[in-house]
Amino acid sequence: MAEKAKVTKRTIDYYTSLGLLKAERSPSNYRYYDYSAIERIAFIEKCKADGLSLEEIKKKLSADFLKR
């Protein structure tokens, strides 16, 4: 997924630990992400490029989720 999203594995782990991404765990403790995670990462990266902090991005993602 890191390759498809054009970020590092560490970035994905960090975003997951902050609650910006959601992952399901396999019985062998691997993380599985749905296809929307790639779009979500692209959104996060764009917001960062626009100067938003990760905390601001998290609030924005939460607000967008509540609108659905």
Image (cartoon, rainbow, N blue to C red):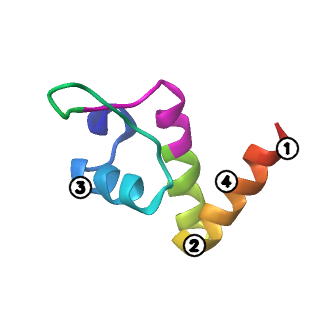
Q: For residue 10, which numbered disc appears in the image?
A: 3
How far apart are labels 1 and 2 at the CA level?
19 Å
Residue type marked 4: Leu
Q: For residue 61, which numbered disc appears in the image?
A: 4
Q: Is residue 4 visible?
A: yes
Classify mark 3: helix, strand or loop.
helix
Q: Are marks 2 and 4 in contact (CB under 8 Å)?
A: no
Classify mark 4: helix, strand or loop.
helix
Q: Please tell me which residue lies in front, 58 or 5.
A: 58
Residue 24, x across and y down, in percent: 38, 32
Q: Say which quarter of the image contains residue 11.
A: bottom left
Which label's residue is closer to the chain start, 2 or 4? 2
Q: For residue 19, which numbered disc appears in the image?
A: none
Q: Say which quarter of the image contains residue 47.
A: bottom right
Which residue is identified by label 2? 55
Determine crowd level at label 3: few under 14, some 14-19, many 20+ residues with C-alpha closer than 10 A: few
Q: Of tags 3 and 1, which is closer to the observer?
A: 1
Which label's residue is closer to the chain start, 2 or 3? 3
Q: For residue 67, which numbered disc appears in the image?
A: 1
Which label's residue is closer to the chain start, 4 or 1? 4
Classify mark 1: helix, strand or loop.
helix
Judge left or right: residue 39 versus residue 67.
Answer: left
**Residue at 57% across, 73% down:** 55
How far apart are labels 4 and 3 at the CA level?
20 Å
Residue 37 inside the magenta-drawn segment: yes
What is the quadrant of the N terminus in the image?
top left
